[in-house]
Amino acid sequence: MRTLIINILLFLFCGFALEVSSSEQPSFYRRWMDLPTERLMEMGRQYERRSMADSAIVCYTIVANRYDKQLPAEDKRRCADAYINMWSVYFLAYLDYPKSYECLSKAQDICQELHIEIPRIDLDQGGMYGTIADICHDSVMDRRAMEAFRKAFWATHRNAEHENMSVAFANLVDRAYRTHSLDSIAREWKEYSRVKFDKDQEYVTYNKLMYTALALTEKKRYAEALRQFEQQLTVMPRDSRHLRYVCQTYFNMGMVHAKQHNYPEAIAALNEVKLLTDSFQMRDIKIELMNTLSLYYAAHGDHQQALEARHSYLQLKDSLLNYQQLKNMSNLEFLTELKKVDSQIQEAKRRKQKQDLIILSVAAMALVALAFLFVVYRKNRALTRRNESLYQKNVELLEMETEHRQLKRHLQEMHDEEAVRQAAVEAESPSEDVVQPSADNASSCPDAPSKYKGSTMTEETKANLLALITDVMENNDEIFSPDFNVERLATLVGSRSKMVSQVINEKNDFNFNTLLNNFRIKEALRRMNDTEHYGHYSVEGISNDVGFRSRTSFTTSFKRVTGLTPTEYMRIQNAQKQQKVGQ
């Protein structure tokens, strides 16, 4: 039993050691893997704002890979948010559209599992479709972008996500104007105008002014449109967070002036954008700026300025292309490494699941073993109580038998010894005193074995012979000789062995050997209890001393008489003695 417990503990230790040894992960993953989910998400957002795409993607990837079917709903939602943020990095920083789409798909799967909607997914899908539409001039992608933005708008409205609602509406207005379908979003415009926003009022005001201005532009009410755009400029502060909105307003103002063929004002509006892009190093906006300026200068007839603007546009485009190529190579290396990390994380999760299964199995085995040990303990405890009870009964019976022998010996001394001797003579010479059993004698022993039906002994003779046999067994140490047999007993009682066997069988329901072993076992018990004279004897020594030739036959007879083995009897005896000494 002790070995079983040790093996179980070793198995558990090996399982935990395997789990620890399998935790080899790349350095940056190991540094952040134990951080809380909220901390990782915040770190990722900070890295995004600082244009540190690689660090941001690592933070989001760790969170996303924590997804498990057994997670609580709130933690699964965090995994979906991580996938959404991963989309933003892959789409805007790495231009990895397939990976972007994969992230959104995984986020969508989690939402379906949780039976929730996350409007941000529709927003991102609309942005992806819109980008593809602008690059490829694809009207189908335009329609998909409109549908996604519209879906996001109403979802954010239902969920009271006002910040994302403003983003969805701004994109919806821009896409509708590009496709000459502002009228199709009249319902959204009406609902957006009715909502009471509790924060980000600059975005709400900006969106309302933009919608009004673009609607006026479509109606060729340019002066009114320009006043709306000018009012937009007073709403947005000129900081890094709002800069793109300001630039978009100046672009729209330039577009309206160009529609009026007022190119000096259009160029002036774009020069404001140039000042902003020079101050904040926004290359992507400056490329679009220089391209548009070259067109406005050419339309105005200023070919020299148009040529310079065109030259600047090409230089910026080439430098940005070279920069982007170098960055893409760096990103490609990083993304390749990140994919390896992702594979390692997934493999680690699979190993962890296997280890959890092993640990669970070991725990189940341990529980079964403990239950088994508990059952064995209870049985052993019950057996110990039973053995102690048997020991006590045997001690009491032995004491009672000793007292009975002493009393009997005293009575025998007072009995007429001559009468006992006469009975022995009659038993030895039946031919002289043959008495045919009467009907009374035959009926006095109805259960006698069939082999004794022809016996001529009377009941009185049998009783007298039994008394002699008992006297020899109780008082003659010769019975402890290994060679003692029924013939020797018959000689000692002055009878024949057949008669002695008959009396023993009829009066005790067992044979001579059983009777002899019973007396020998009782003597062995007396000697075991007499530690003063026999305390140095072993079980085998006592066994030989009372006439048993083998330890096996002694143990069998001892168990039959006492209900205990000799070893159990002596163990209980020693325990009780030690207990008495301790008291």
Image: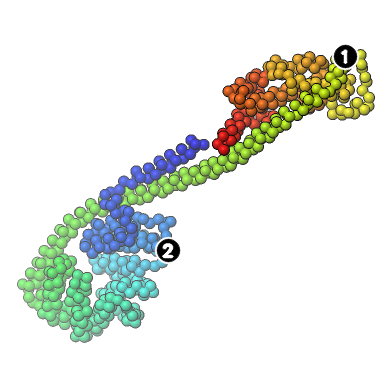
- Residue 19's place in the image compared with 86, above or below, is above
Residue at point 38%, 46% (across, down): 351
The image shows residue 533 at horizontal and vertical percentages of 62, 23
The answer to which of 339 and 202 lies nearer the viewer is 202
Q: Is residue 368 left or right of residue 232?
A: right
Q: Which quarter of the picture shows residue 293?
A: bottom left
Please say whether residue 372 is visible from this viewpoint: no
- What kind of residue is marked 1? Ser
Residue assigned mark 1: 429
Residue at point 72%, 31% (across, down): 400
The image shows residue 474 at horizontal and vertical percentages of 74, 23
Q: Is residue 237 left or right of residue 66?
A: left
Please say whether residue 542 is visible from this viewpoint: yes
Callout 1: 10 Å neighbours few (<14), some, many (20+)?
Answer: few
Residue assigned mark 2: 114
Which secondary structure, mark 1?
loop
- Residue 74's place in the image compared with 437, above or below, is below
Residue at point 39%, 60% (across, down): 76
Q: Is residue 261 left or right of residue 10?
A: left
